[in-house]
Image (cartoon, grey):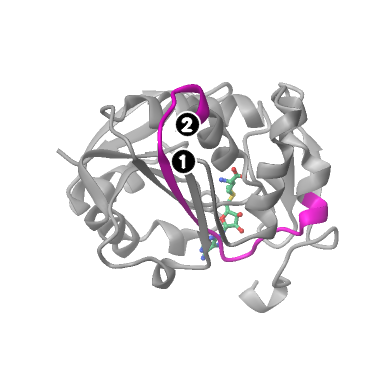
């Protein structure tokens, strides 16, 4: 597979919806032959890995800066936004996504309804239809790659949500973790659903202190890497 096999904006020829075990939907990518979230529960996984063991563990600071590698369906971004409004935090969210999905696909996923925040649907849609916006104290920005991010930007929490190393080994290379480490604030962290030994060693080589912690439903462990 090459990047040329993937449309600039992914529609129904590229992805289809899969309902996971907690009743929430995810996408299956035909090009990568992988689901965007765990089939054991898309929302359960996102909440566990990125919110409970990522964002919630960041020392309280406002604004809090989040970088997500693999914006995908926008589920993690939307959960981060809900966290910000629940905790009255100013938040700066930046998502990296090489293959954005169509607004039509995002509408069908309808995470705001599943999460019982239908009144926030407009924000979820704006995450897909706009590359940057500010809503109250929530600042959203979406870029295609690292080149879209200022060299001076630093992040308190990195959601590392690339497809698995087996599906996209190039996104788990040492140079990626070196780059992410240089963008992490002291005391900040990187979290991922993946617990693979080689990924952990690369994070350690980049400079992170890495711990294996209990994973979401269907996964024994996940990784949390801290810049001490
Ligand atoms: C596991 S999914 C992310 C799920 C997402 N965090 C969510 O909440 O839906 C992996 C994502 O990485 C994106 N991706 C693949 N190659 C990429 C690249 N080279 N740079 C940035 N994103 C990439 C895919 O398009 C996909 O959206």
- Asked if residue 26 is positioned above or below residue 205 in the image, the reply reads above
How far apart marks 2 and 1 lie (CA) works out to: 9 Å
x and y, in percent, of residue 111 in the image? 72, 34
Q: Quadrant of the C terminus?
A: top left
- Asked if residue 14 is positioned above or below residue 79 in the image, the reply reads below
For the residues bearing labels 2 and 1, Cβ distance under 8 angstroms: yes
Answer whether residue 128 is magenta in the image: no
> Residue visible at 69% across and 72% down?
8
> Residue visible at 66% across and 26% down?
40
> Residue visible at 55% across and 60% down?
97
Rendering quadrant holding ligand 1: bottom right
Answer whether residue 91 is magenta in the image: yes
Q: Is residue 186 visible?
A: yes
x and y, in percent, of residue 98 in the image? 57, 66
Give the magenta-colored segment's residue range.
Answer: 84-105
Q: Which mark is residue 84?
A: 2
Q: Residue furthest front?
A: 136
Q: Residue furthest bottom?
A: 4
Q: Is residue 20 visible?
A: no
- Left or right of 10? Residue 66 is left
- Left or right of 114? Residue 158 is left
Q: Residue furthest left?
A: 228
Pointer 2 local density, CA inside 10 Å: few below 14, some 14–19, many at least 20? many
């Amino acid at each position: 597979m090459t990047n040329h096999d993937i449309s600039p904006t992914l529609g129904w020829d590229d992805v289809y919806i899969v309902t996971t075990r907690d009743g929430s939907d995810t996408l299956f990518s035909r090009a990568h032959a992988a689901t965007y979230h765990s089939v054991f529960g898309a929302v359960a996984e996102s909440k566990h890995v990125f919110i409970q063991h990522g964002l919630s563990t960041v020392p309280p600071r406002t604004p809090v800066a989040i970088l997500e590698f693999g914006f995908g369906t926008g589920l993690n971004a939307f959960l981060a936004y809900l966290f910000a409004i629940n905790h009255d935090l100013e938040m700066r969210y930046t998502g990296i996504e090489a293959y954005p999905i169509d607004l039509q696909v995002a509408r069908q996923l309808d995470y705001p309804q599943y999460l019982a925040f239908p009144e926030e649907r407009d924000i979820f849609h704006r995450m897909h239809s706009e590359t940057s916006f500010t809503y109250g104290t929530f600042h959203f920005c979406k870029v295609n790659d690292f080149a879209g991010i200022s060299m001076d930007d630093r992040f308190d929490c990195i959601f590392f949500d690339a497809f698995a190393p087996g599906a996209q080994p190039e996104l788990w290379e040492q140079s990626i973790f070196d780059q992410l480490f240089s963008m992490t604030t002291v005391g900040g962290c990187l979290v991922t659903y993946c617990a693979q030994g080689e990924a952990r060693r690369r994070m350690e080589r980049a400079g992170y202190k890495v711990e294996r912690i209990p994973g979401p439903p269907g996964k024994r462990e996940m990784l949390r890497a801290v810049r001490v």
